[in-house]
């Protein structure tokens, strides 16, 4: 089942999510000696990843990281590159040495197969994800493919998703945003043993309401998180502002 935790401020929310993530990683490393994670990107993850990278007591050398999604045709030097983002905000700060980045500049289908094969070798211990303004999960825009078993797929990005990227300042205009991307599939994300979903900001409130309180369906891709046995969604007051269930703000701080 999904647990919803809401906090008054985004910085408090991010620290709480990072503490939960760090606890999972420490426990997993203590039990298994290694841990496998999936890392999200985007403006919504800035504070969370900073707090997680600063968390003590994690042997990052024993952590293997997989990447949720990446634009097709965008060079790693571009400010919007998710490879660049993860290198700068997680890989270098922590010293992770085992990671699998998605190279969308060359053979995208080959990358899907190669990284997907690595991903399939063992279970993922925890996935860190967000929810897009259009309800997307990774780059699975509505209507998302809820059936494919492929670990990574090539997807078309809808206009709402591409406008979000412009609004967040990653691109100067809509014409600069790639129209396709590599994305981890919905079913693959749901295979993670635990999922932490970090969603701050008022602009996400409509999608949060639709995906967390509405029916599970491909037109609200992140609604699929409702079906996961161990998913926790971290919200701030702004992103939780449209929720009507009284339990939604039970953990406000």
Image (cartoon, helix red, strand yellow):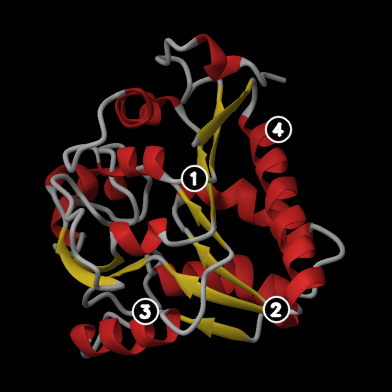
Mark earlier in primary sequence (4, 2)? 4
- 52 relative position to 80: left or right: right
**Residue positioned 32% across, 37% down in the render:** 223
Position of residue 38 measured from the top left corner of the image (x, y, whole percent): 50, 65
- Residue 34 image label: 2
Q: Is residue 36 above or below residue 212?
A: below
Mark earlier in primary sequence (4, 3)? 4
Category of crowding for the residue at label 2, using alpha-carbon neighbours closer than 10 angstroms: few (below 14), some (14–19), many (at least 20): some
Q: Quadrant of the C terminus?
A: top right
Q: Which residue is mark 3?
A: 102
Q: Which residue is mark 1?
A: 229
Q: Are marks 3 and 2 in contact (CB under 8 Å)?
A: no
Point out the frontmost of discs 3 and 2. Answer: 2
Mark earlier in primary sequence (1, 3)? 3
Mark earlier in primary sequence (1, 4)? 4
Cα gap from disc 4 to disc 2, whole angstroms: 28 Å
Category of crowding for the residue at label 4, using alpha-carbon neighbours closer than 10 angstroms: few (below 14), some (14–19), many (at least 20): some
- Residue 12 image label: 4
Point out the frontmost of discs 4 and 2. Answer: 2
């Amino acid at each position: 089942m999904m647990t919803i935790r809401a906090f008054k401020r985004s910085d408090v929310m991010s620290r709480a999510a990072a503490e939960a993530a760090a606890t999972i990683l420490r426990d997993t490393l203590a039990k298994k000696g290694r841990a496998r994670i999936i890392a999200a990107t985007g403006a919504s993850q800035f504070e969370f990843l900073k707090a997680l990278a600063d968390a003590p007591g994690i042997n990052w050398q024993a952590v293997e990281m997989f990447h949720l999604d990446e634009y097709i045709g965008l060079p790693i030097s571009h400010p919007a590159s998710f490879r660049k983002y993860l290198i700068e905000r997680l890989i270098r700060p922590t010293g992770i040495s085992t990671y699998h980045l998605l190279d969308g500049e060359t053979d995208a289908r080959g990358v899907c197969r190669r990284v997907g094969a690595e991903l399939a070798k063992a279970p993922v211990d925890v996935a860190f994800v967000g929810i897009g303004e259009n309800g997307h999960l990774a780059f699975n825009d509505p209507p998302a493919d809820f059936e494919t078993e492929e670990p990574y797929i090539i997807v078309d990005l809808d206009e709402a998703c591409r406008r979000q990227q412009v609004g967040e300042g990653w691109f100067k205009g809509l014409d600069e945003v790639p129209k396709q991307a590599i994305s981890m599939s919905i079913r693959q994300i749901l295979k993670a043993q635990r999922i932490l979903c970090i969603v701050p900001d008022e602009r996400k409130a409509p999608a949060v309401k639709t995906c967390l309180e509405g029916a599970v369906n491909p037109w609200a891709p992140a609604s699929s998180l409702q079906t996961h046995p161990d998913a926790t969604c971290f919200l701030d007051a702004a992103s939780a502002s449209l929720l009507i269930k009284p339990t939604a703000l039970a953990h406000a701080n």
